[in-house]
Amino acid sequence: MTEVTIKRALLSVSDKSGLVDLGKALAARGVELLSTGGTAKALRDAGLAVKDVSEHTGFPEMMDGRVKTLHPTIHGGLLAVRDNPEHAAAMAEHAIGAIDLVVVNLYPFEATVAKGAEREEVIENIDIGGPSMVRSAAKNHEYVTILTDAADYAAFLGELDQTGGATTLAFRRKMAAKAYAATAAYDAAISQWFATVDQQEHFPPVLAAAHTRVTTLRYGENPHQDAALYVPRNPAVTGLPQATQVQGKELSYNNYNDANAALELVAEFAGAKPTVVIVKHANPCGVATAETLLEAWKDALECDSVSAFGGIVATNVPLDGPTANAICEIFTEVVVAPGADDAAKEAFARKKNLRLLLIDSLPDAGRKGLVTVPIAGGLLVQDRDAGKIDKSDLKVVTKRAPTERELEDALFAWTVAKHVKSNAIVYAKDGVTAGIGAGQMNRRDSSRIAAAKAREAAETHHFSEVRTVGSAVASDAFFPFADGLMAAVEAGATCVIQPGGSIRDEDVIKAADEAGLAMVFTGMRHFRH
């Protein structure tokens, strides 16, 4: 059946947005309105004639409203195959009238959980009758129209206008798909709540998760790939999807990916002195902490000014005019910050293509959570890398202990290395990255590349000496051989921070002692792939 005329509708909604206008439009077409509780009251208050579901079924609501629509008269009217003689006979025998339209949105379970309600209230906001009607109507979409989102009311009324009071099969199929997505997401939220509140298995037997599409993107990582942005239905943390885009072109897939990498790193410095992170292809190419944001920007840029071209910038404090003007001196794709003053906004406005994103607050760098990686035929799931260390966690393994300044630089370099693709080597001095080596297949090459970056920066910016001299160097995993360590010695580093744990640790420690290095073990690895 291609077109189905709407003659009887059942409306039962928690979100009453657009309800009255929809009810009036249906009533104007002579559609009989069935409803329950607050929905019926809202329609009657608007002067519309409404028949209670209990009157329609001949069965009263009971058990504090838990049982209202769970009745054969309702579900028979929804599930009957209209051109099936046996179904038609059963409807006639039991006085079951066909229901052509169901308008239902579900109890606000997720909102109830989000506000911290007690268990009893949360349980009472698990909708039973609503999902049952939604699923019945969606299953029988050949004959029944289901609406679960007020945003679809206008399109539905447009269907009625175009067809003289009916809906097309194409529209009903589209709404059915959306309805099942809604009930699946609803059940996923309930499943997640039970797993969390009852402290069930860390990794549940079935991983239930639901995300809502925010927007489609121009393309994916490459132009031949399609892409879209989704968010959790009730995100536990705010980030780029919740940011305010003040100006600039729409964000691309790569913009989101790189800006998130920058935001996650700069969040490690929440509450610290002004810090600037510059990211390219999801790897930091310069990070600096200073007394002023402008100074931090200049220091971060000098680490690798070539790679910074076309990069992403993130700050841990609101942007000011001088810093914004300095950023505008080079081509920058995206700037992310927890605020910006008027002078900064005016400066960026001169770069109309630059995307300026302002967030209310930095995400919690230590937050717990799960991250996933799709693989052929499956999905890898692990805890988010929220590991952090401080001075008390460090184990001095060399004859010489690091100085206070070396410790500060070591911890700074270690924090940055956590966000660099493995194998990661980061040199840092005085709160500034001197050189970053990322993504190499062996640690020695990463160490040499980082040192080479530092030498190039010294030549470009006419430093009196290469910044790796007297620096601390961080390695995201242990040095399997002393050669990677010796590359750091050649670069002038005086302190090393690494996880330790190699079967050749003693050889590496011996080499460090012979070179006069101070070295500390963290006991924690930060692989990043």
Image (spheres, grey):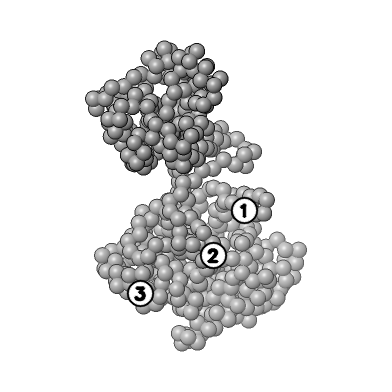
Q: Is residue 452 left or right of residue 4?
A: right
Q: Is residue 435 left or right of residue 115?
A: right
Is tag 2's residue or tag 1's residue first in the polypeptide sequence? Answer: 2
> Can the viewer see residue 516?
no
Q: Where is residue 372? Give x, y as percent.
A: 59, 51
Identified by mark 2, the residue type is His
> Can the viewer see residue 159?
yes
In the rendered image, which residue does mark 2 sit on?
A: 224
In the rendered image, which residue does mark 3 sit on?
A: 328
**Gap in Å between the C-alphas at discs 3 and 1?**
38 Å
Q: Where is residue 216? Give x, y as percent.
A: 45, 55
What residue sits 53% from the left and 84% below the top? 456
Q: Where is residue 465? Give x, y as percent.
A: 51, 85
Is tag 3's residue or tag 1's residue first in the polypeptide sequence? Answer: 3
Along the line of sight, the residue nearer the viewer: 418 or 333: 333
Secondary structure state at the residue bearing disc 1:
strand
Is tag 2's residue or tag 3's residue first in the polypeptide sequence? Answer: 2
Along the line of sight, the residue nearer the viewer: 354 or 408: 354
What residue sits 48% from the left and 34% below the top? 1
Identified by mark 1, the residue type is Pro
Q: Is residue 512 above or below residue 53?
A: below
Q: Which mark is residue 343?
A: none
Identified by mark 3, the residue type is Cys
Q: Is residue 317 above or below residue 134?
A: below
Along the line of sight, the residue nearer the viewer: 88 or 475: 88
In the rendered image, which residue does mark 1 sit on?
A: 374
Secondary structure state at the residue bearing disc 2:
loop
